[in-house]
Image: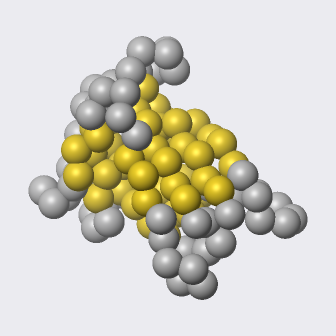
Amino acid sequence: MAATVSKSGTPGPITDRIALGGTGGNATAVTFPRWAREISIRIFASDNETQSAGFVSSTGTDGAAIDSNGIRVELGVPYMLNPSPGGAAVVLYVSGDAANDVAHISVSA
């Protein structure tokens, strides 16, 4: 279930869709590149059109229930993160409320 958001060559914008697994509320570990300066995550149903909701956490275990310290991602409202420049790769744990939800992710340098 774990996923890596990446791009070969020069750092630049990335958009990706990541399946969040067959069980609502279970975390998928998503690794972002070191150069990421802005990360946006929105949750959609498996049809990739219907908005859904879920959680994002900086701690957790891939495939397990999302950490109780997770931040709620509401319908239609993206989760935004601006990582520190020059830091290590960022790993976030993302879950949807429903089975087979999808995370729409945007990353900027």
Viewed as shown, does residue 71 lie left or right of 6?
left
User: Which residue shows up at 55% across the image and 74% down it?
Assistant: 89
Viewed as shown, does residue 37 lie left or right of 45?
right
Up-down: is 10 above or below 66? below
Up-down: is 76 above or below 89? above
Quarter of image, res 61: bottom left
Viewed as shown, does residue 93 lie left or right of 34?
left
Task: Judge by depth and name the residue closer to the eye, 33 or 79.
Answer: 79
Q: Quadrant of the C terminus?
A: bottom right
Residue 12 drawn at (x, y percent): 76, 58
- Whether residue 63 is visible here, answered yes or no, is no
Residue 70 drawn at (x, y percent): 21, 55
Residue 21 drawn at (x, y percent): 40, 37
Up-down: is 86 above or below 7? below
- Whether residue 7 is visible here, answered yes or no, is yes
User: Which residue shows up at 27% across the image and 34% down it?
Assistant: 74
Viewed as shown, does residue 4 lie left or right of 19?
right
Q: How is the image coloured?
A: secondary structure
Quarter of image, res 101: top left
Q: Residue furthest left?
A: 68
Up-down: is 15 above or below 80? above
User: Which residue shows up at 54% across the image and 43% down it?
Assistant: 105
Task: Judge by depth and name the residue closer to the eye, 32 or 82.
Answer: 82
User: Which residue shows up at 13% across the image and 56% down it?
Assistant: 68
Residue 27 drawn at (x, y percent): 32, 50
Q: Residue furthest right?
A: 9
